[in-house]
Image (tube, helix red, strand yellow):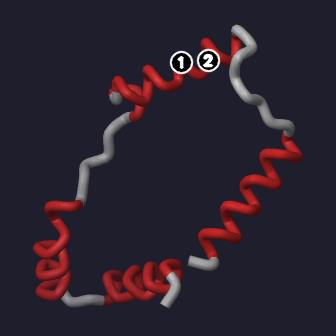
Amino acid sequence: MKTILLKEKLHHYIETAEEKKLKAIYAMVKDEIKEPVSVWEDKTIVAELERREKAYKNGTAKMYTIEESVKKAKRAVRKRASE
């Protein structure tokens, strides 16, 4: 079964499940659930964005046209859909 179908089935089940079953599901996955964190608080992400900005400004970054970006994105979506 594809990931998207699994997610849809789980979403539906969670929306309609009884409280007892929800608590059981939550107990199984609670250690994997992370609280949302602002990306601006993540020093690694901020450092990477600053590195990329510097590379862009000094002309050393690999740049893509809109067409190239769309082509790469479509390829990535097809690849994910076939997994």
* Residue 4 rendering spot, x and y as whole percentages: 52, 79
Circle 2 packing at 10 Å, graded few (<14), some (14-19), many (20+), is few
Mark 2 is on which residue type?
A: Glu
Above/below status of 22 relative to 77: below
65 in relation to 23, above or below:
above
- Quadrant of the frame with the C terminus: bottom right
Residue 21 location (% of width, % of height): 16, 87
Measuring 73% from the left and 28% from the top, which residue is drawn there?
62
What's the mark number on residue 42?
A: none
Q: In the rendered image of this protein, does residue 30 appear above or below residue 42?
A: below
Which residue is denoted by mark 1 in the rendering?
A: 51
Q: Secondary structure at mark 1?
A: helix
The residue carrying pointer 1 sits among few (fewer than 14), some (14 to 19) or many (20 or more) residues within 10 Å by Cα, namely: few
Q: Cβ–Cβ below 8 Å for labels 1 and 2?
A: yes
Residue at 40 percent of width and 80 percent of height = 11
Residue 57 in percent (x, y) is at 70, 11
Q: Secondary structure at mark 2?
A: helix
Q: Is residue 36 left or right of 8 when viewed as pictured?
A: left
Residue 33 pos. (x, y %): 24, 59
Left or right of residue 3: residue 69 = right
Q: Residue furthest top?
A: 58
Identify residue for label 2.
53
Residue closest to the eye, 63 or 19? 63
